[in-house]
Image: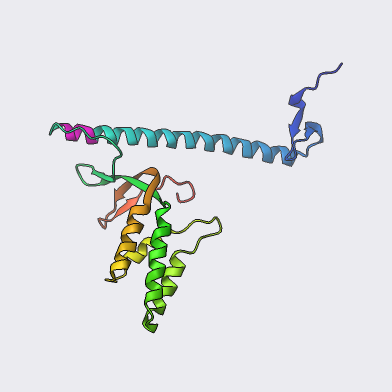
Amino acid sequence: MNTLNLDDYRQDARGNLIPIKNIRPIDLMRDELVQELVAKAHACAEQLQAFKQKALDDIAAFVQLSADRYDIKIGGRKGNITLHSFDGKYRVLLAVQDRLIFDEGLQAAKKLIDECIEEWTSQSRNEVRVLINAAFDADNEGNISTARVLGLRRLQIEDAKWQMAMDALADSLMVVTSKSFVRVYVRQENQEYKLLNLDIAKV
């Protein structure tokens, strides 16, 4: 019984094993180029991941070292931190970005807001109604924009029920995930700081 030698075959996009002798040379060259570039991209991605983790650890250690001067222990999640080199040429920024959602309390806030709208019969309030309805519109995945909803809090409305609704909005907001980003900046001749791009698409 003959054993299939996989070295003599290449798997195509549909999962079929194709004899290498039946594949055009240009297709084999293309495949080799892509495989080589992907391997190098994986290596770069691993280096970036290692750099990010090392940078996060080093910054956290430095912040604690700085706090140790005052016998303070820093625990829990850290916020945004900016570090500068002594000559001011370089800036390292640790940015923490939270993903916010609303819990079930959002429904209570929306009910209070709806009651406010019903009580306001003046025609001058029509713009507010449109703004509010747009704020609570969900996207294709059923998610409501936290930015648009929280934008309602900037409206200068002194109505007591409206203020209660705004308090309900604040209370219903919760952080579900946090992402940390390390950004490195270099000062230019015009004294502006320029981001050092670590994104291959922007280099």
* Near-viewer residue (76 or 55): 76
Residue 2: give x, y in percent of width and height: 85, 18
- Residue 64 part of the magenta segment: yes
Residue sitting at x 68%, y 38%: 31
Q: Is residue 130 above or below residue 140?
A: below
Q: Is residue 79 above or below residue 122?
A: above
Residue sitting at x 29%, y 40%: 78
Residue sitting at x 27%, y 55%: 189
| 159 to the left or right of 45 | left
Q: Quadrant of the N terminus?
A: top right
| 43 to the left or right of 193 | right
Residue sitting at x 48%, y 46%: 200
User: Which stretch appears magenta?
Assistant: 63-68
Residue 142: give x, y in percent of width and height: 53, 56
Farthest residue to the left: give it: 70
Look at the image and tell me whether residue 143 can be seen. Answer: yes
* Near-viewer residue (117 or 13): 117
Farthest residue to the right: give it: 1
- Residue 109 part of the magenta segment: no
* Near-viewer residue (94 or 2): 94
Q: Main secondary structure of the magenta part?
A: helix
